[in-house]
Structures are given as C-alpha cells and as structure tokens.
C-alpha cells in the first residue's frame, strides 16, 4: 500500500486565475478540504507580469491591471481560508487521482484527492517550433519571457526590436518596449489577419506608429553572438515566402508572439483524452475530463483572450468539482458537440443529457468571416444563433444554449459559421 | 605562461587527449577560442557511436572507430555519461540496394565489426514497425550505439581538470612558433603560452594550425550538417538508429533517438566557406524533412523543439590525420576529425597518449584521481530517490526547468563543476535546463539569476554562449536615460 502524505477532497493544480477561481467556487459550494498547489512563489500566475490595464471589464465592470485583477481573487481565497502551497511543483497526476508534488519546504508529497482540477495554464510557442532558419544567437525571446524581464526583473532584453506574430502579448510588449525607450521596428504576422485583439492593435501598434506587416514572416535570423538582424518577406496564400519581397531589418531583439499552447504534460501523464484542435483536454459541459473526478479550466483547457472568461469558466469547473464530491454529478449520457463549417475546437466537446442549465459554447473561427451568422443545430433544428459584423480567429466566440434547448437535446450538436446571404 | 603540454581545442578530441595525459607527470593546459568545452562540432552532431562498418578498411578512421566504439561502454560507465547500445539499421528501398548493403556488410566484416546481418524488408519492419513499409532490405548493426556528445566532452574535461589540467577559454590562437630553445610559443588574442609539447586538436581550425608549423599543407573542407530535434513528449518511433542506404542520389539522412529520448533527424552535407557559419537554411531544413520522411512516414513537425547545424572538418584526403607533425619537433595533431570522430575519440586519445608518452618519456603519476561520478539527474530518479534528494538538500525541491524537471541544486552544481558552466547554453547542455519544449522561455530568467549569483557577475554580463551574446541590455531605468 502506498503512503499518502495526506488526503484531500479537491486538489487544484495551479494558482493562476483559473486555479484561484476554481478554488473559490469549490469552497463557496461547501467543500472545505481543498488544497491549491502553485509552482511559483506568488499567486495569480501570468497576471503578475501583465502590468497594463484592460482586465476585468466584463467581470467587474472596471479596468484593472493584471496584478490588481489577481489580487481580488487572492484576497477572496485568503478570506475563505483556502490552503495554498506555493513554490510547489506537481510532478505527476495519476489516473488514480494521486498527485506527486515537490517543494523545498515540504519535500516530496504524495497526495490522494477525490477530485482534481487541472489549471496549469499555457506556454508560448518557441522559435524551435516554427522551424525558422538562421543562427542561434542571443536576443530571441518569446514575448512573455521579455515581459517577465521588463516587468518583474527590471531588465531590458534589447534596444531595437522586431516582433514576429501578432498575439496579444507581442502587441502589449511592442508598446511596453517602446515606452521603456526601445525602438520597435515592426510587427510581422504570417496570416492575413492579426491573431490579437483589435483593441491591442489600435492601442499598442497604431498609437505608436509601429507598422504591422500582415502576410509576412521572418525567413532568416542573423548574428553570430547577439542578433544583428532579421530578413522578412511577404508570403503567398500557402504561407510560402515570395521571392523578391525580402527586406532586411537591423535589430538586436526578436520577440515571438506566435501562439500559446495549453500545458498538458500532467494531463497526458494522467491519461486524460486531449483534443488535437485545442491541445487541451476533452471535457463535457461540467468541465469534467475523460477521467471521472478530473476537471479542468482556463488556458490549459483552451487558450482564452480575456482573463474574465477564464474566471467565469473556473467558477463553473469549481462548482462541478464540489458537486462531484457531494455525489451530485452522476455519470450521464452525453451528446457530442461538433465543429461545423468555419469553426475550430469548440469547448465543451460533449453535453450531458437530461439537465436544465444554459451552456456556453466557445470556439475560434477558422478564418475571417464578415457579416456572418454563427448557428448551432441539433437533429436538423437550429437551436441557437448569433450574428456579428466580423468573426476572426483572434477573438473567441461564445454562443449560449438556452436551458430549454439543453433540456430538449437528444442528438449531437453542430456549431457553424455561415456568411449572410 | 609555461606549460609542459599545450592542447589546442577543447572539443571531445582535445578533452580525451587531456584526460589520457593527465595521468602522467606533466603540466597540461587546454586552450579554446570559445567560452566553454564542446562548443564546436562536439556539441552539434548526431551523437552516434558508430560500429565502424562504414570506414575504408585499413584507414585511420576504421582503426580508431572500431577501437573507440569498443571502449565506449566502459568509458561512459566510468564517467557516468549516458550511453545506449541501441543497434542500427541501414535501410534500402530498391531491389538493387541489396548489393550496396552487401558491400557495406563485407566492408564491416573486414573492419571486424561483429553481428552484421542483411534483413529482408519484412524482417526489418518486424523489428521497427514504424519504418516506411516500402523497405526492401536492411543491414542490421547490433553493436551501434548512442551517447550524449557534449555530456561526454564535459565529463572528460572535468576528469582531466581534477587531475590538474588547466582549461583556458576565449583564447584564439594567432600564431605558432618553435623557439631557438626548442619551446613552442603560442600567441593568442589574450597573451602568450610556451610549451614543450604542442597538440593540435582544433577541429575546424586544425588545418590552419597545422599549416602554421608544417611544410606539408592540409586542407579542411567545412561540411555543414543541419538537424531538427523533436520533443521527447512524443513516443520514440524507433529503438534503433536508422540510416539510409547510400544511393546515386547521395547519402541519406539519419533518424535516431537520442539518449534522452528526443528524436534527431539529419544531417545535410553542404560544403561551405565559413567554418563558423552554423546557421540553418530553409533549403537545408526542407531537405532534412523530405529525406527523413522516407525512413519515417509518420514524422510530424508539430513537435520540433529546435533546429541547428554542426560543421564537420573534412580533410581533403578523406582520412583522419593523427600523430606527430612531420618536421615539427614536439608537435602532435589530430586533424580532419569528422564523423566517426565522436566514436573514435576515446581511441584517438589513447593513441596520442601512447605516442607522446613513448616519444617524450613521460612518467606515470603516483596517484590518479578517479572521475567525480555524475549524480543521477533528478528527472531520472524514482519518487523515493527524489524524496531523499530533497530531504538531503532542499534546493532539489525547487524545480527551475519545468519541461525537463531540473532542480535549482542541479543548476548550481553545473556551474560549480571542475569545468563549470559560465553561460546559459553551458547550463543547458550540462543539466538540460532549457532543453525542453519551451526552450527556456520560463526558466532562462531564473537561470540567469543563478549564474549571476554563482559567478558574482551582474545579470547584464551573463551571456547565452560567450562573446557578445549578452542576454540583457541594461536595466529599465538606464534604458530610459539613454533616450534623454
């Protein structure tokens, strides 16, 4: 028999916005024996380095900085007396809901949980994953790493900057580096549209006269020791560089903002089914994964645009875990949620039958659709519909199923985007 | 500065020779122009321990490869360096490839490589089901192996260092002269060294140095090889290293697992002018992928974590040149050490040591310090071992690199080794912090902190890989002052 350091009802892996939100909901739904494990020496996750404002508009109706947003959840967690261990790294999550974690303070712990909420967040796609050729010099960072240097450590990673990719962190860092005295030469985006929020394009690039090159990419990286320049080129419809369109930019820094990847090594180790589309676990509408008792929420499930939605999702996942502990979440038959035309990676992937609650379906459009309609159909019937001037991969779409539609479900559900006629 | 023996080049060959000679009564200094051990070809190759079937029978390559490969198991065991005898296959896709494979088999038998066997495509697929089903024949080489080339080089250097060898980095040799009093005078960018015995193990630069002291010039062709490295999260598709049968279309690429269970694919072979141009190219990387897909149709580039290139020092004559430098008293060399140089390294070290000890009449030291055994990486420990490690040293409880699970204590130890890490890349190659899928995105700020603390240097002085490869350009307030 294995010796457990302790047993808990709910164990939450990660103390970022998703983990904190889930913890609050677990406790508020009547479960007291819960534990949050966080690998950093502070709570709030990546919000701590997001010192710009714009957080909390949806949830609090006001504009907060990242640390301010996080502090509200941290305060609530403390108020509720929820136990937290920081500087504690979870090394494995077992199918049997046994978690191993290590820290300097508590050594190695084996913790048996009745339910686990995975809230590990995501990481940035590095240069190596792009296959960009060139030298392996210093001065190439993912945007989030640069953000950590500037905002947490107080150091500048460089002076003349090119940004590859137009993800939100890259856009935010274009402004941040500029304000801190660096020259940002360009933001280069492979796709014909930005993957960041429109408000960030305006406030972080346009307001500072930083050009955004759409349908362009970096095709060469130069510099023996430190980066000395990059070559950018226009790309064709197949994203291949167009000969003759090359342009050299002299810079000492290349920041990458080319996508976020849910960090699911622990989920994979546990044997949780993952979706190739979201790179996150497959869940039902209670945010339960393929392993009973393992729940998940936040960017480890699918990458969100706004932390407000991460919190919203984490409250639901936390509440589900509490219900599961109380025996109020029995196994149920489910129907599948399918991606139709123009839709990629809808979460949740399954809906439980025989319940009466509204459900939010979230997904990213697979391209840019102007003046279009998002529809949800089931059994040949349209059960929800949302019109928008533009649907774009940079902005996640949420479409709600009314509770009477959920109650009436008997067949799989398909989400699609149609251009208006 | 005077030293009895001066070795130029701190790659796997220079370090192997230094370690062999460190058992003898002599002061030994190793110079390298880079900031660390193993910064040239030794860090950027496939990491294969070739069995020796490929080299021309009777050549220096064949001789040192076969002998070196036979030494690997014990050497890696002694030094605590990963080594796996995983076997290899050379695969062909055409009926006529059988003749080529039979030629290789014959050559291998002449080189006294044991266990070689021709397999049918069906037999090969039984051994390695993820191979391209169109395989016609394969040559099986059970004695082939894999190692970690830079970890081997670090271990050789550490062992030499604990036996008194001095390592001097950032020393670029500008001139070599033999004094009237019979001493070698070596001028570098930093100063001057004198030595009784000179050993040229300068890899890509070895012919340049040779030509400074010899009337019989040598010529090195810089042959670049590009690679992709894949994330070890994906299951290893082949246990064995898989070569492609050489055809009239050229030499194929290798698909191999590494000792850390990453997959490595490559290399290309491009002759280039600049022996230090280790950049990769779109064309080269495309070739690697196209050729690798032939062996491994299931290859998915989704999981690449890095691409890089290494430069092989190919001497025009095609063979290794090992021994005394003709007409240069007290000078020895290992020139043109390309593949299978890693496999041959232990034998080259042994051979040069034997020659030098005899010629120069060196005496064995009364005591030879055994190698410091490399501690088991935290990541490879059982849960019980991990628990014990953290109990003994709480810094093992702080995981700095989350992808590869590397602890703060391991990073500090990498810096404190006899020939310790001084750079971000040095830490990465010694203990794998930053070697994983996020490529140091999360851990590099922390590793910079630790380097700065251990080396007592400001963070702005910490580099990625020496020279001007600074990671930070100043603190944020200085950056603003610059604007005024």
Image (cartoon, coloured by chain):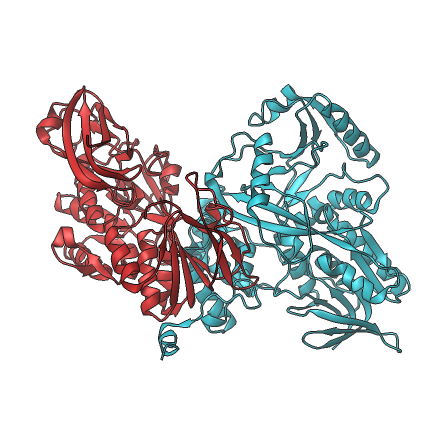
Chain colours: A red, B cyan
Q: Is residue A332 left or right of residue A119?
A: left
Q: Residue furthest right?
A: B327
State the image coordinates of residue B455 (x, y, percent, origin top left): 52, 71
Front position in the image: B395 or A52 = A52
The quadrant holding residue B325 is bottom right
Front position in the image: A45 or B299 = B299
State the image coordinates of residue A336 (x, y, percent, origin top left): 25, 25
Q: Residue furthest front?
A: A244
Tell me the quadrant of the picture where the C terminus of chain A can be found: top left
Q: Is residue A239 above or below residue A64?
A: above
Q: Is residue B59 left or right of residue B80?
A: right
State the image coordinates of residue B142 (x, y, percent, origin top left): 69, 32
Q: Is residue B144 left or right of residue A4?
A: right
Front position in the image: B220 or A96 = B220
Instruction: Tell me which residue sits at (54%, 64%) in the image.
Output: B423
Front position in the image: B330 or B84 = B330
Instruction: Tell me which residue sits at (83%, 61%) in the image.
Output: B332
User: Is residue A74 at least partly visible in the picture?
Assistant: no
Q: Is residue B481 above or below residue B376?
A: below
Q: Is residue B292 left or right of residue A128?
A: right
User: Is residue A189 at least partly visible in the picture?
Assistant: yes
């Amino acid at each position: 028999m294995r010796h457990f350091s302790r047993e808990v009802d709910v164990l939450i892996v990660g103390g970022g916005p998703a983990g904190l939100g889930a913890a609050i909901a677990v406790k508020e739904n009547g479960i007291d024996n819960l534990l949050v494990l966080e690998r950093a020496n502070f709570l709030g996750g990546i919000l701590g380095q997001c010192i710009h404002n714009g957080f909390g508009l949806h949830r609090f109706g006001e504009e907060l900085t990242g640390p301010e947003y996080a502090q509200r959840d941290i305060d609530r967690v403390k108020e509720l007396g929820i136990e937290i261990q920081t500087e504690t790294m979870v090394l494995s999550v077992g199918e049997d809901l046994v978690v191993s974690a290590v820290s300097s303070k508590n050594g190695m712990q084996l913790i048996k949980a009745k339910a686990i909420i995975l809230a590990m967040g995501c990481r940035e796609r590095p240069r190596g994953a792009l296959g960009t050729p060139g030298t392996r010099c210093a001065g190439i960072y993912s945007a989030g790493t640069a953000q950590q240097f500037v905002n947490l450590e107080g150091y500048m990673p460089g002076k003349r900057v090119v940004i590859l990719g137009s993800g939100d962190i890259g856009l935010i860092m274009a402004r941040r580096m500029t304000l801190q005295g660096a020259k940002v030469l360009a933001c280069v985006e492979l796709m014909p549209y930005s993957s960041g929020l429109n408000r960030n394009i305006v406030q972080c690039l346009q307001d500072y006269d930083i050009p955004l090159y759409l349908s362009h990419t970096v095709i060469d990286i130069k510099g023996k020791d430190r980066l000395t320049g990059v070559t950018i080129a226009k790309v064709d419809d197949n994203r291949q560089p167009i000969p003759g369109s090359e342009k050299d930019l002299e810079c000492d820094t290349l920041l990458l903002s080319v996508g976020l990847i849910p960090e699911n090594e622990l989920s994979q180790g546990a044997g949780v089914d993952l979706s190739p589309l979201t790179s996150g676990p497959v869940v039902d509408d209670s945010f339960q994964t393929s392993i009973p008792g393992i729940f998940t929420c936040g960017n480890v499930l699918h990458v969100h645009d706004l932390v407000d939605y991460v919190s919203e999702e984490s409250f639901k996942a936390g509440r589900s875990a509490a219900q599961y502990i109380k025996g109020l979440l029995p196994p149920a038959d489910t129907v599948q949620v399918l991606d139709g035309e123009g839709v990629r990676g809808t979460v949740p992937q399954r809906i439980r039958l025989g319940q009466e609650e509204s459900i939010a379906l979230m997904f990213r459009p697979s391209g840019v659709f102007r003046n279009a309609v998002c529809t949800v159909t089931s059994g040949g019937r349209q059960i929800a519909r949302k019109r928008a001037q533009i649907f774009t991969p940079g902005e996640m779409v949420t479409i709600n199923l009314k509770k009477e539609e959920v109650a009436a479900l008997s067949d799989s559900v398909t989400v699609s985007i149609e251009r208006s006629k | 500065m005077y030293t009895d023996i001066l070795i130029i080049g701190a790659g796997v060959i220079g370090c192997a020779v230094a370690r062999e000679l460190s058992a003898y009564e002599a002061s030994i200094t190793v110079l390298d122009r880079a900031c660390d051990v193993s910064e040239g070809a030794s860090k950027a190759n496939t990491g294969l321990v070739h069995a020796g079937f490929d080299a021309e029978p009777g050549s220096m390559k064949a001789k040192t490869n076969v002998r070196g490969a036979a030494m690997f198991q014990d050497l890696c065991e002694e030094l605590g360096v990963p080594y796996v005898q995983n076997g290899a296959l050379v695969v062909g896709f055409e009926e006529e490839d059988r003749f080529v494979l039979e030629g290789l088999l014959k050559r291998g038998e002449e080189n006294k490589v044991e266990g070689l066997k021709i397999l049918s495509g069906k037999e090969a697929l039984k051994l390695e089901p993820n191979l391209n089903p169109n395989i016609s024949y394969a040559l099986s080489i059970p004695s082939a192996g894999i190692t970690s080339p830079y970890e081997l080089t670090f271990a050789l250097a550490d062992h030499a260092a604990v036996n008194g060898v001095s390592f001097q980095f950032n020393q670029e040799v500008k001139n070599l002269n033999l004094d009237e009093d019979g001493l070698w005078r070596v001028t570098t960018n930093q100063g001057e060294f004198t030595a009784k015995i000179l050993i040229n193990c300068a890899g890509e630069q070895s012919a340049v140095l040779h030509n400074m002291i010899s009337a019989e010039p040598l010529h090195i062709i810089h042959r670049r090889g590009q690679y992709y490295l894949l994330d070890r999260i994906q299951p290893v598709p082949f246990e064995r290293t898989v070569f492609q049968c050489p055809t009239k279309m050229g030499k194929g690429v290798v698909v191999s697992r590494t000792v850390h269970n990453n997959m490595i694919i490559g290399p290309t072979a491009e002759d280039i002018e600049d022996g230090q141009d280790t950049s990769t190219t779109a064309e080269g990387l495309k070739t690697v992928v196209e050729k690798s897909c032939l062996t491994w149709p299931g290859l998915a580039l989704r999981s690449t974590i890095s691409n890089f290139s290494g430069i092989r020092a190919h001497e025009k004559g095609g063979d290794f040149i090992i021994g005394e430098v003709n007409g240069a008293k007290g000078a020895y060399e290992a020139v043109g050490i390309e593949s299978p140089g890693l496999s041959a390294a232990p034998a080259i070290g042994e051979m040069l040591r034997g020659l030098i000890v005899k010629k120069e009449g060196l005496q064995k030291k009364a005591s030879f310090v055994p190698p410091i055994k490399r501690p088991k990486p935290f990541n490879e420990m059982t849960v019980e071992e991990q628990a014990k490690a953290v109990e003994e040293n709480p810094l093992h409880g702080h995981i700095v690199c989350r992808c590869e699970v590397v602890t703060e204590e391991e990073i500090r130890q990498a810096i404190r080794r006899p020939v310790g890490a001084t750079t971000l890349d040095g830490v990465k190659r010694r203990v794998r912090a930053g070697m994983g899928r996020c490529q140091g995105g999360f851990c590099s700020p922390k590793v910079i902190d630790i380097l700065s603390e251990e080396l007592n240097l400001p963070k702005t002085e910490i580099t990625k890989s020496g020279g001007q490869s600074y990671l930070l350009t100043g603190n944020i307030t200085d950056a603003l002052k610059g604007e005024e």
